Image (cartoon, rainbow, N blue to C red):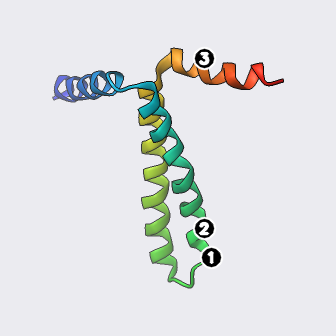
């Protein structure tokens, strides 16, 4: 059973690695609105149960897009992004 899940995770990583750097950046930037929504929904006049469900949903989407974007970008892409910030100083 464990080998089955390890195989699925390996297949997902291989699929994400085939995507372009630009796609990774777009997906990585999508996590920002999800993080904002996960905490901004607390200002709505909803029941605490509804707020909890929305927080889990939006925070989960934020984390999923963050990790997917980082998996697409990879180590070289991360160095490229860090280079943008260090060269501007």
Decide which of 42, 52 is in the foreground and name it.
42
Residue shown at the point (31%, 22%) measured from the top left: 18
Toward which corner of the image does residue 8 lie, by quadrant? top left
Instruction: Provide residue 80's location: percent of width, then percent of height.
Output: 60, 19
Judge depth for marks 2 and 3 and give the one in front: 3
Residue displayed at 54% across by 61% down: 38
Look at the numbered disc 2 and give the secondary structure of its residue.
Answer: helix
Residue 38 to residue 17: above or below: below
The residue at 52%/14% (across/down) is 76
Q: Quadrant of residue 37?
A: bottom right
Give how far across and how far down residue 35 sits, in percent.
Answer: 56, 54
Task: Give the distance between the C-alpha atoms of the residues marked 2 and 1, in whole angstroms.
Answer: 6 Å
Identify the residue under disc 3: 79
Mark earlier in primary sequence (2, 3)? 2
Local SS, label 3: helix
- Residue 10: x and y in percent read 27, 22
Counting labels gives 3
Query: Distance from label 3 to label 1 (Cα)?
Result: 37 Å
Mark 2 Cα-neighbour bin, 10 Å: few <14, some 14–19, many ≥20: few
Residue designated by label 1: 43
Q: Tell which of 48 and 54 is nearer to you.
A: 54
Residue tagged 2: 40
Q: Give the CA distance from mark 2 to mark 3.
A: 32 Å
Residue lying farthest right?
89
Q: Residues within 10 Å of mark 3 (few under 14, many from 20)?
A: few
As drawn, is 51 to the left or to the right of 85?
left
The label number, if any, that marks residue 52 in the structure image: none
Other-residue count near label 1 (Cα within 10 Å), few / some / many at <14 / 14–19 / ≥20: few
């Amino acid at each position: 059973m464990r080998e089955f899940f390890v195989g699925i995770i390996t297949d997902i990583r291989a699929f994400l690695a085939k995507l372009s750097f630009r796609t990774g950046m777009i997906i990585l930037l999508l996590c920002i609105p999800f993080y904002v929504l996960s905490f901004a929904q607390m200002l709505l006049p909803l029941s605490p149960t509804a707020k909890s469900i929305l927080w889990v949903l939006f925070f989960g989407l934020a984390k999923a897009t963050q990790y997917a974007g980082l998996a697409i970008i990879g180590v070289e892409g991360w160095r490229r992004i860090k280079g943008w910030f260090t060269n501007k100083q």
